[in-house]
Image (cartoon, rainbow, N blue to C red):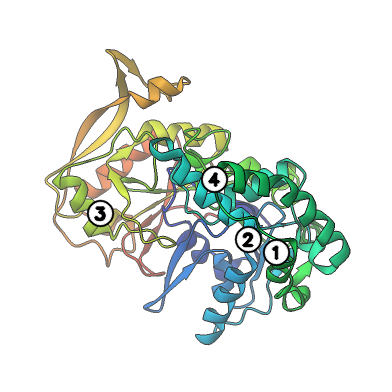
Amino acid sequence: MPAVVVLGVQWGDEGKGKATDQLGSRIDYVVKFNGGNNAGHTVVVGGEKYALHLLPSGILSPGVVPVIGNGVVIDIEVLFREIDALEGRGVDTSRLLVSSAAHVIAPYNRTLDKVTERFLGKRRIGTTGRGIGPAYADKINRVGIRVQDLFDENILRQKVEGALDQKNHLLVKVYNRRAITVDETLEDLLRFAERLRPFVADTPLELNRALDAGKTLVFEAGQATMLDVDHGTYPFVTSSSATAGGACTGSGVGPTRIDRVVGVAKAYTTRVGEGPFPTELLDDDGEWLRQTGGEFGTTTGRPRRTGWYDSVVSRYASRVNGLTDIVLTKLDVLTGRDRIPVCVAYDVDGQRFEEMPFDQSDFHHAKPVYEYLDGWTQDITDARDFDDLPAAAQRYLLRLEEISGTRISAIGVGPGREATIIRHDLLD
């Protein structure tokens, strides 16, 4: 049985949660392997909308084991707020497993995230201020707090003391903020420890044994390829590995066990936060996409920047992830356009780039080279087969498939779980 990675092709918000949820009845485990509560998935089931942040979307599928892997950073209060909200709506969350090696977001991580962004001013990254970046920085600096530390107060105190020795100097002397005490930090971290304990597990062992037993696993990325800390539009990126390689390091499952890598892309492009965005529309077309597509952040509510489909980005994502399939979402949003531009290359000071420029400055100055495809006016939300689509919509999809470098295996034509056209089986 397969192990499948599901990740974003663009800058996030592509509909990864829906893509994972669609496989729910056929999979046994869904693993979140990176990120924190700075990202969100919106899944619509039976007309009910669920906004997920830390929890994998598999939490909504009966019988599926949702797993928060070691590559995730966890705000424990947010985790239980999300669990309580789902339980209040009748969703069973008791199957959840949390890696003992996952790192915890401490109060000082959130504080530093917010004051640093304000301090940067025009050079800000555009973070959500939830402490994700500082928590990952602590991890790399080897002063981070892991889930397992919450169950040994002596170890936890030593780690907090070591972290605050440095951070309080920064807060007080650079940012003119008050010092944070060890005791208040311990109180914040320990208040949910006993409630968390039953969920904690050796998740790498659990997942590898599941694969040995023939179970089907889906690894669900937070954020997306163009926000990956190594392969994204650095420095306007997230702090974790959102590409296929991150599924292995963030879960403890080796690369030889991965069978398929599914990239999720919108039929157009969006981005939240700062950074370059070649196809961005700052006109009425951009606002039309935003309003028609409901392009406002699941986690933050921030309006998303919008633009036309960028095949240069898709080809790049296909290459660095080794994509086997693309799930294209929100095709229905484009209904009603006479012509639909698609970016097929970039122009940088008169030089044409068919592939992603390796130089950050070139990408920052890239102008889209558009090809114009015919649009359609027919409502496509009831289409369930490729042949049900208008001829122009079919041609649009086939052209995107051709220039993106990966087959389009599923097409979203509406927000509901059932509003999908399947062209190729993602698990076969």
x 53%, y 54%: residue: 426
Q: Secondary structure at mark 3?
A: helix
Among the two numbered marks 3 and 2 on one chain, the one whose residue lies closer to the N terminus: 2
Residue assigned mark 1: 185
x, y percent for residue 14: 41, 52
Which amino acid lies under the numbered mark 2 shown in the image of this protein?
A: Pro
Q: Which residue is mark 3?
A: 290
Q: Which quarter shows the N terminus?
A: bottom right
Residue sitting at x 18%, y 52%: 288
- Which residue appears at 37% of the width and 70% of the height? 416
Q: Earlier in the sequence, mark 3 or mark 1?
A: 1
Q: Secondary structure at mark 4?
A: loop
Q: Does residue 117 appear in this view?
A: yes
**Which quadrant holds residue 82?**
bottom right
CA gap, disc 1 and disc 4: 19 Å
> Which amino acid type corresponds to the residue marked 3 in the rendered image?
Arg
- Which residue, given by chain and number where applicable, does mark 4 sit on? 175
Determine whether the residue tagged by mark 1 lies in a helix, strand or loop. helix
* Other-residue count near label 4 (Cα within 10 Å), few / some / many at <14 / 14–19 / ≥20: some
Mark 2 or 4, closer to the camera? 4
Image: 422 above or below 83: above
Mark 3–mark 1 distance (CA, rounded to whole Å): 40 Å
Residue 32 visible in this rendered orientation of the protein: no
Residue 422 point in image, percent of width and height:
42, 58
Q: Which residue has dot 2 on it?
A: 107
First along the sequence among labels 4 and 3 = 4
